[in-house]
Amino acid sequence: MYKVSQDHIETTFSAIRSRGGYNNNPTCRQFNAAYKRILVHNQVVGSIYGNGTILNKTKNYIESSSSLDSDLPLNSFHQLDHDYLDITNVGHFVENISNYVAGFEARAVAKKVTCDNCKKMLFTTTNTSASHSQLLEQKDRGGLSKPSETVRKICLEAERVFKSSLFSVNHKKTLIFSRIKQKIICIN
C-alpha cells in the first residue's frame, strides 16, 4: 500500500521546500533550481518534519552531463533516427515572425555601423506583399524596418539552427554559433 500512496510525492516536495529554505511559496525559477539540484545530486530524502517518511532505500543514479560531454567530439551534433519535426520547413507563422525580428535586428545593426553603403544593404525599399512579410505589413504603422532579403534569410537560418539544436545532446553556445556561421556562409 505504501508504494501507491502519495508519500513519495510528499517527500519529494519536502526536499524541494528544504532546498529553498522551507519557502512555502517558491517562484518558478526557485522551484526549477531546487528540482534540478535534487535530480543531479540524488538528494530526495525525507524531512523528519514532513508528512511522509521513506521506508525503502531506493536510489536513482543519474549520469552526470560532464561525463557525457567528454566522450563527444567538439563538432558533433546528435542525429535523431527519425525526423519528428521538419526543421527545414519552418512554416509561414515562423517565417513571418523571423521577418519581423530581422527588421529589428537590421535596425540594431544599423545603429552600430558607420558605413552608409552597409546600412543600405540591411534594409529594402521595395514594398513586397510576400507571404513572409504579412505580419510586418499588418503591424507596420510607418515605423517598422523592412529587412533586406539577405538579413531575412540569415535570421531564418538562425531560427532553423536554434530549432535543430533543441534536440541536440550538445547545447554549447560555441557549437550553435559556429553552425549558424556555416549556414550564413552557404546563403550567398
Image (cartoon, rainbow, N blue to C red):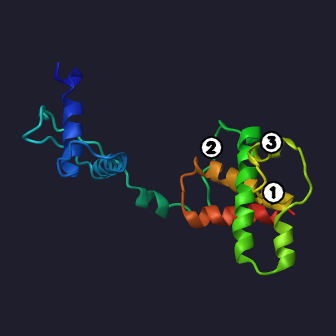
Q: Amino acid at mark 1?
A: Lys
- Label 1, label 2: how far apart the Cα atoms are: 36 Å
Q: Is label 1 or label 2 in front? A: 1
In the picture of the structure, the residue carrying the numbered disc 3 is 134
Q: Quadrant of the image for the C terminus?
A: bottom right
Return the disc, 1 or 3, that comes first in the chain's sequence.
3
In front of the other: 116 or 85: 116
Q: Amino acid at mark 3?
A: Gln
- Label 2, label 3: how far apart the Cα atoms are: 33 Å
Q: Is residue 5 left or right of residue 182?
A: left
- Kindly identify the residue that appears in the image at 18 percent across and 52 percent down: 21
Q: Residue furthest top?
A: 1
Disc 2 residue crowd, few under 14, some 14–19, many 20+, Cα 10 Å: few
Q: Secondary structure at mark 1?
A: loop
Q: Is label 2 or label 3 in front? A: 3
Q: In which quadrant of the rendered view does residue 138 lie?
A: top right
Disc 1 residue crowd, few under 14, some 14–19, many 20+, Cα 10 Å: many
Q: In which quadrant of the rendered view does residue 1 lie?
A: top left
In the picture of the structure, the residue carrying the numbered disc 2 is 80
- Kindly identify the residue that appears in the image at 68 percent across and 62 percent down: 179
